[in-house]
Image: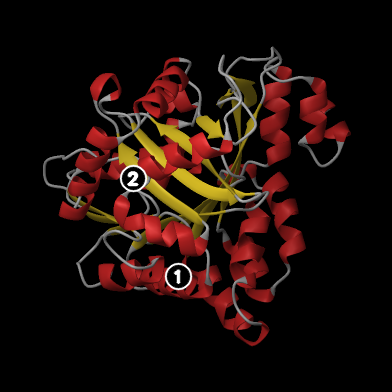
């Protein structure tokens, strides 16, 4: 999949103009297989490795030097937006020894100084074994014909990776027109026979998520990937797309599957929520909630805990009537329908010796669940 012309121009500029010292820090982070590079005045450059923050062997960053460095890294046509909005998201494709690696950047102001966080994105979409995501579950999600699938969890829990892996299954199978709206672009989907993927970046190719969705519906899509549902306009158009025969994948920030459903409805005014619940009960297919939990040995790779909800008749009824408190019970009792609760997922990790008792107890509703 090739980016749009604007995306190509953006990446070419940054490959040649990205500050060398920042490229070096990113190279150190990538070599260590860190997820993020953090740059904040007064602190050394730091990386997040397996969930833990670690300083690089560098001096604390001086504010003036860091401001210059991050302005140089910022695409020129985004610099005015950074000044006015005081925060900016963009993505870059790096060259040289980091060719094939993409970086999702967030620039921000703190105590009057510019700071940055750079998420390192592998050049290729990871495989399910690396991500510890059940391939059987991914194939079931990819086989859905229409409706909405929501992947939820806190920042850094791997939501974008999960969606990229699932949508790439559809891409590889062929026969589908796929449209993604992201802010910024992360993984690039490969070109596959008899598939067509258009990736549109908010702020570069399209003004907003809602605009991208609205326009995308005119482009004969089978599958629509919405990087994140943040407001009621995007949420409403996504529901309408799911109702009219499209398969819509998106993310939300919430603690668990039930929280994703309540958060979705809370995006709307009180007088609209009854209708939204009815729509959601009709077109929601599944919610997958994710958490990354630290290994029992500090510094090792984190473990994926999953909660999986399928929109069965009882779940649909609970959504329609607003009786969300019953959803947790269905997650626990309807295993034959493919439901998995966080309690069950965490218990498996604990019994396998992958996470500590303390971590396990922090991630179940009641500690007694671990020993049943």
User: Residue 2: image x %, image y %?
Assistant: 17, 44
Secondary element at image label 1: helix
Decide: few, some or many residues near mark 2? Use Cα within 10 Å; few <14, some 14-19, many ≥20: many
Which residue sits at x=49%, y=42%?
Answer: 67
Secondary element at image label 2: helix
Residue 24 lies, with reference to residue 311, above or below; the image says above
Q: How is the image coloured?
A: secondary structure
Left or right for 56, reference 16: right
Which residue sits at x=18%, y=46%?
Answer: 8
Which residue sits at x=34%, y=68%?
Answer: 207
Who comes first in sequence, dot 1 or dot 2?
2
User: Residue 321: image x %, image y %?
Assistant: 68, 75
Q: Which residue is mark 2?
A: 167
Residue 298 lies, with reference to residue 37, above or below; the image says above
State the count of labels. 2
Question: Do callouts 1 and 2 mark residues in contact (Cβ within 8 Å)?
Answer: no
State the image quarter where residue 208 is shown: bottom left
Furthest-left residue in view?
193
Quadrant (top left/top right/bottom left/bottom right) for the N terminus: top left
Which residue sits at x=25%, y=28%?
Answer: 95
Gap between marks 1 and 2 measured at Cα = 20 Å
User: Residue 76: image x %, image y %?
Assistant: 31, 52
Q: Which residue is mark 1?
A: 234
Closer to the camera, 133 or 105? 105
User: Residue 61: image x %, image y %?
Assistant: 57, 29
């Amino acid at each position: 999949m090739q980016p749009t012309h604007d995306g190509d121009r953006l990446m070419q500029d940054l490959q040649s103009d990205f500050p060398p010292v920042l490229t070096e820090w990113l190279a150190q982070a990538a070599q260590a297989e860190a997820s993020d590079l953090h740059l904040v005045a007064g602190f050394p450059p730091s990386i997040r490795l397996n969930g833990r923050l670690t300083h690089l062997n560098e001096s604390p960053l001086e504010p003036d030097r860091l401001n210059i460095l991050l302005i140089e890294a910022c695409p020129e046509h985004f610099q005015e937006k950074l000044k006015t909005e005081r925060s900016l998201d963009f993505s870059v494709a790096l060259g040289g020894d980091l060719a094939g690696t993409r970086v999702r950047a967030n620039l921000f102001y703190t105590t009057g100084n510019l700071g940055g966080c750079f998420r390192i994105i592998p050049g290729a979409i990871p495989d399910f074994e690396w991500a510890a995501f059940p391939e059987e579950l991914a194939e079931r999600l990819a086989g859905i014909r229409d409706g909405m699938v929501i992947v939820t969890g806190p920042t850094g829990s791997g939501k974008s990776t999960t969606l990229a892996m699932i949508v790439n299954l559809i891409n590889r199978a062929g026969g589908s027109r796929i449209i993604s709206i992201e802010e910024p672009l992360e993984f690039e989907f490969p070109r596959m026979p008899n598939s067509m993927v258009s990736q549109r970046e908010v702020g570069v190719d399209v003004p907003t998520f809602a605009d991208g969705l609205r326009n995308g519906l005119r482009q004969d899509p089978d599958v629509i990937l919405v990087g994140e549902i943040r407001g009621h306009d995007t949420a409403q158009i996504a529901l309408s797309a799911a109702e009219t025969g499209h398969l819509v994948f998106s993310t939300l920030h919430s603690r668990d599957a039930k929280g994703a459903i309540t958060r979705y409805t809370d995006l709307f005014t009180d007088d609209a929520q009854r209708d939204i619940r009815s729509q959601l009960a009709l077109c929601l297919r599944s919610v997958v909630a994710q958490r990354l939990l630290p290994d029992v040995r500090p510094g090792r790779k984190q473990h994926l805990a999953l909660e999986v909800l399928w929109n069965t008749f009882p779940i649909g009824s609970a959504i329609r009537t607003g009786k969300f408190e019953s959803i947790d019970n269905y997650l626990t009792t309807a295993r034959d329908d493919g439901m998995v609760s966080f309690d069950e997922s965490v218990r498996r990790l604990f019994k396998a010796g992958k996470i500590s008792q303390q971590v396990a107890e922090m991630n179940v509703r009641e500690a007694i669940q671990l020993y049943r």
